[in-house]
Image (cartoon, grey):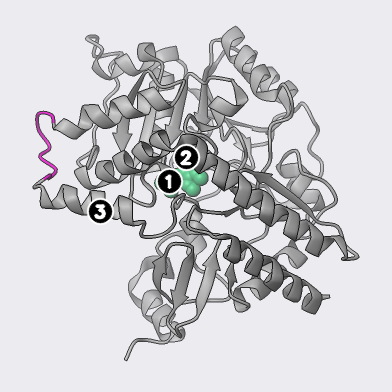
Amino acid sequence: MTETVGQAVERRRQYIGGGTMSINRAINPSRLFVRAQGAYLWDDAGRRYIDYHAGFAPYLFGHADREVDEAVIAAIRSGASLIGAGTMPWEAEIAQMLVEAVPALEQIQLTSTGSEAVSYALRLARAHTGRDTVVVMQGGYNGWADYVSYNLMDPRALVEDHEEGEEYPLRVTTAGIPEAVGSTVRVVEYNDLAAAEKVLATRQIAALILEPVLQNVGIVKPLPGYLEGLRALCDRYGTVLIFDEVKTGFRHALGGYQQIAGVLPDLCTFGKAVANGYPMGVVGGRKEIMALCSDPDPKRRVVIAGTYNGHPVNVAAARASIGRLKSREAEVYGELERLGARLEAGLNGVFASRNYATTLVRQGSAFATYFMDHAPVNWRDIALNNDNERDVAYRRAMIEAGIFHFPVATKQSSISLAHTDDDIDRTIEITADVVRALG
Ligand SMILES: Cc1ncc(COP(=O)(O)O)c(C=O)c1O
């Protein structure tokens, strides 16, 4: 007999430090998921859920996608193995595909995760500029590395007094980071160009890193001119502009959000959808910076290393994913937009009759329903205005009703190509029931 969810959680607590493999996975209501396919998840009781969490967003084609999985199986059967010496045919091939797909990529390196890609991007920027300090965004998430583990989402009490145009006092979000690291990090608010300018004008900033759309606190879009403004400031003050496209990349356009925005960063990072759920990260950008990986001067050379970099299984998944996006670009992004618009229209209809405010914000297949009366412009706006209690109650009730949105306030949801019109319509119907019952 399989374990109950309670037993599985207990055994996890016993053998896994902290009781969870990744901080956010310990959810309420607790679930023991045993299978995923396409747009659906199944739990140990055989209940099916329409999934909008999508494993924190990689599944652009849906879970266990046949084309991607067959490419992976073919790679394994062909004897492709991680040799770890010399080169292998698929390395240059995937690199070329990525460079041809994404405007800012002139050269790339592969990693196994988004966090590694971000770590390398920061190292490259520091080597390139000869400066130490990096700027990160309040409300942004760039992985778990030390340099990006500051502030993220300050609680309401800390953002209340924050003034536009100013940086935030530093707040480290995890134990185990040396104090010296904090002396090389500055935190500003997204969509606050004046704050970025004030910090960059010190001419001590190696890199400014941001998700071009803040997608770890829902969908917070750049105000008109913001990304262009950051580009101009970085040029003026000699700072490397890094777009962390781990979530936005391949989901919104083959060329990433940079293609939509028409603003090119110096470096950018990818992960998640690049390999439809297989672990791969990408860091790349201007050749002049990427060339530091083999700079003849050992003082300037940036060491890139990783046993699993360019692993054939992950690369096979990425080749299949990007190949499909390239060959059916208009069809894929057209369909994601169509599904997204259908869901948006339905949910807006459902919430229109309530006596509290909601705002659905969407970029293609990615969306978030905020429990506030406007689309937020940054984290402070969310912290001050979103009704987190109602947000979480709604998400929990949706899970009980068979629709899986991540049960933490403001977390972004993702539609995949595996979702059908029926899934979308069923979601709208269930949402209407849930919302009615919640009152
Ligand atoms: C924008 C962004 N950057 C970086 C990361 C880190 O990627 P990984 O979890 O693969 O290390 C994430 C993960 O959620 C992310 O959303």
**Residue 144 visible in rendering:** no
Q: Nearer the viewer, residue 115 or 163?
A: 115
In percent of width and height, residue 102 lies at 44, 26
What type is the residue that disc 3 sits on?
Glu
Q: Is mark 1 within 8 Å of ligand 1?
A: yes
Q: Is mark 2 within 8 Å of ligand 1?
A: yes
Q: Is residue 435 magenta?
A: no
What quarter of the picture does the C terminus occupy? Answer: bottom right
Q: Distance from label 3 to label 1 (Cα)?
A: 19 Å
Q: Mark 1 = which residue?
A: 272
What type is the residue that disc 2 sits on?
Val
Mark 1 or mark 2, earlier in chain = 2
Q: Which residues are magenta?
A: 80-87
Q: Mark 2 = which residue?
A: 246
Residue drawn at x 53%, y 72% as measured from the top left: 49
Q: Are marks 1 and 2 in contact (CB under 8 Å)?
A: yes
Q: Decide: is 180 above or below 286.
A: below
Mark 3 or mark 1, earlier in chain = 3
